[in-house]
Image (cartoon, helix red, strand yellow):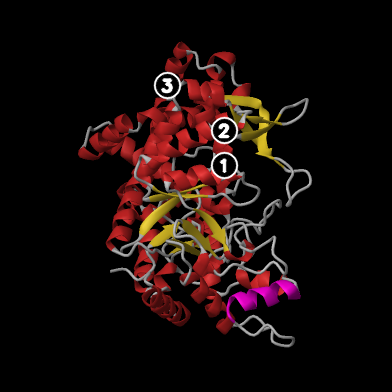
């Protein structure tokens, strides 16, 4: 196996199939991996898979960072759903929603979630009576899963059951005994909501089974699966409810003003109470790391600087960093990143933007690569600010043509200044004389891909849009609307190996891998 890797960045929701209900589903990972094998790609980086709250579409706003959203479950692979009669047993509204979700070119989360919720509830009633209460082998498998994953699953399932009972209001507005997790109140709730709690445990077991089957197929194709670790959980989440003392609930996490924003960012998420967490030996972070290692082969650590120091905005007064001193920040970041490194996960630190040098020093000491986005890698203090040749990137780095937040290459090129494009062409080794600037073309796209493949970085990732030269975006930061988190491939994933454009791309990537030592052995 080569120690030079190359992979795709693509959200699971984008990988729609002919069998799916309008959104990418867990088994679609296996189908995608087969095409990736042809293209000599050995990494698939997904966005977070956590359960989203109603009406939300951003994978970074999940109600849980530990679970898998049930909307990614493929229903026609559930024996209980087939046993209930399948799609034919659904309501007219749900069937019409599935048809519409399949027809439109973007993900309709509202339709998908409503139809799948109805289908999962229908399947669960058969499981409850025919398997669980009968004590079958499948019931024993679920019971073993509940026991093994209980450290997070018990809180997850009870939280969702209570949230439904309390009309989806935040846990901070529940009756005090429940909000404060009084043991007797929790025991009573578990008894009263036993079937509802079991339903949420069952959906996670079902999703986990489909995930592990897809992961095994991906491995057989030589493809490692990378997750994306959100920096902090949603304030209205089982993680925060169960560990409220480890968060400053009224201090909003974000980032300070920098070159990209005069005001910084306020994420509306709770701030870690790092002194309390450190005093507890980072216990929850250890368990979170173990959970990620059980699911993924590698992990992108989002906003890695926030694990060294978190920028909090209190209701009154000035924002501040926690921990406050650089020595404490270094010690904390090293401790947390060591926890994740010790799991054996292949880590990639998202260290983009205004990142202190001490963060990169610690990452280097631990052997954790940071990110090198080609369009931002320039000699900023040199006259003309030339782009850095990717061949000069250090081996311990992850080269990228973009991220899920950036515009695809074709859009970036269209809006880049003439000086910027001229400097980029020089980096590619082209003629940058007046009149020599190329327009965007398939040839230019492949010259950029070839330069990326030649990079010194051991890890290389492409947003799938850049491989094809598509202009479609996953997300426009700082905006809200149906243009975010809804893009899907132009054809079902089953057609990847037959679609002429996809076959041509696979051949080009395979050739680049062979020419640059990134081909799998």
Residue visible at 44% across and 65% down? 17
**Which quadrant would the N terminus be assigned to in this image?**
bottom left
Camera-nearest label, 3 or 1: 1
> In the rendered structure, are the residues bearing label 3 and label 1 in contact, judged by CB atoms less than 8 Å apart?
no
Residue 384 spot, x, y in % from top left? 72, 69
Mark in front: 1 vs 2: 1
Mark 2 highlights which residue?
Answer: 329
Marks 1/2: CA distance?
A: 9 Å
Please report contact status of discs 1 and 2: CB closer than 8 Å, yes or no: yes
Residue 19 in the image, given as x and y percentages of width and height: 41, 63
Looking at the image, the residue that sits furthest to the left is 137
> Residue 135's quadrant in the figure?
top left
| Callout 1: SS | helix
Q: Is residue 183 above or below residue 352?
A: above
Q: Quadrant of the C terminus?
A: bottom left
**In the image, residue 250 above or below residue 41:** above
Residue 340's spot in the image, x, y percent? Answer: 41, 40
Residue 203 visible to an observer of this rendering: no
Residue 353 seen from this side: yes
Q: Does the magenta run of residues contain 425?
A: yes
Name the residue rendered at 23%, 34% in the picture: 140
Name the residue nearer the viewer: 392 or 434: 392
What is the magenta range?
418-429
Q: Which residue is mark 1?
A: 358
Write down the residue under mark 3: 190
Q: CA distance from mark 2 to mark 3?
A: 40 Å
Q: Main structural element of the magenta stretch: helix, strand or loop?
A: helix
**For the residues carrying marks 2 and 3, which lies nearer the camera in this image?**
2
Q: Nearer the viewer, residue 387 or 218?
A: 387
512 relative position to 404: left or right: left
- Which residue appears at 73% of the width and 52% of the height? 260
């Amino acid at each position: 196996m080569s120690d030079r890797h190359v992979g795709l960045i693509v959200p699971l929701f984008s990988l729609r199939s002919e069998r799916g209900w309008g959104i990418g589903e867990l088994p679609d990972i296996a189908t995608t991996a087969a095409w990736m094998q042809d293209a000599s790609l050995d990494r698939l980086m997904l966005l977070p898979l956590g359960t989203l709250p109603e009406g939300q579409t951003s994978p970074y706003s999940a109600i849980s960072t530990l679970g898998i959203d049930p909307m990614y479950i493929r229903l026609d692979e559930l024996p209980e759903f087939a046993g209930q009669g399948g799609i034919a047993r659904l309501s007219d509204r749900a069937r019409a929603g599935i048809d519409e979700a399949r027809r439109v070119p973007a993900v309709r989360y509202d339709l998908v979630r409503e139809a799948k919720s109805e289908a999962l509830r229908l399947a669960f009633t058969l499981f409850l009576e025919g398997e669980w209460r009968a004590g079958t082998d499948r019931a024993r498998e679920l019971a073993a899963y509940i026991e093994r994953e209980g450290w997070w699953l018990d809180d997850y399932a009870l939280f969702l059951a209570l949230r439904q009972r309390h009309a989806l209001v935040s846990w901070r507005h529940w009756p005090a005994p429940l909000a404060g997790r009084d043991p007797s109140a929790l025991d009573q709730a578990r008894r009263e909501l036993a079937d509802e709690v079991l339903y949420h445990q069952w959906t996670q077991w079902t999703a986990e089974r489909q995930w592990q089957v897809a992961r095994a197929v991906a491995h057989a194709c030589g493809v490692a699966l990378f997750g994306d670790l959100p920096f902090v959980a949603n304030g209205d989440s089982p993680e925060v409810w169960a560990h409220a003392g480890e968060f400053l609930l009224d201090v909003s996490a974000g980032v300070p003003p920098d070159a990209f924003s005069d005001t910084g960012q306020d994420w509306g998420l709770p701030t870690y109470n790092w002194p309390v967490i450190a005093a507890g030996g980072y216990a929850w972070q250890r368990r979170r790391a173990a959970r990620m290692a059980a699911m993924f082969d590698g992990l992108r650590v989002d906003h890695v600087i926030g694990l060294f120091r978190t920028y909090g905005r209190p209701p009154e007064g000035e924002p501040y960093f926690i921990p406050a001193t650089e020595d404490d920040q270094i010690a904390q970041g090293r401790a947390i990143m060591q926890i994740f490194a010790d799991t054996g996960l292949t880590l990639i630190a998202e260290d983009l933007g205004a990142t202190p040098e001490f963060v990169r020093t610690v990452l280097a000491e631990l052997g954790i690569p940071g990110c090198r986005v080609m369009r931002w890698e320039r000699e900023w203090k040199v006259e003309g600010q030339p782009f850095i040749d990717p061949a000069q990137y250090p081996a311990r780095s992850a080269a990228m043509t973009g991220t899920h937040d950036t515009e695809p290459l074709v859009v970036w090129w269209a809006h880049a200044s003439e000086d910027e494009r001229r400097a980029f062409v020089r980096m590619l080794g082209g003629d940058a004389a007046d009149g020599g600037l190329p327009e965007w073309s398939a040839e230019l796209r492949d010259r950029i891909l070839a330069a990326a493949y030649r990079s010194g970085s051991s890890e290389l990732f492409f947003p799938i849009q850049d491989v094809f030269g598509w202009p479609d975006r996953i997300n426009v930061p700082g905006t809200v609307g149906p243009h975010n988190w809804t893009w899907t491939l132009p054809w079902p994933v089953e057609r990847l190996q037959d679609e002429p454009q996809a076959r041509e791309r696979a051949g080009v990537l395979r050739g680049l891998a062979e020419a640059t030592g990134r081909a799998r052995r």
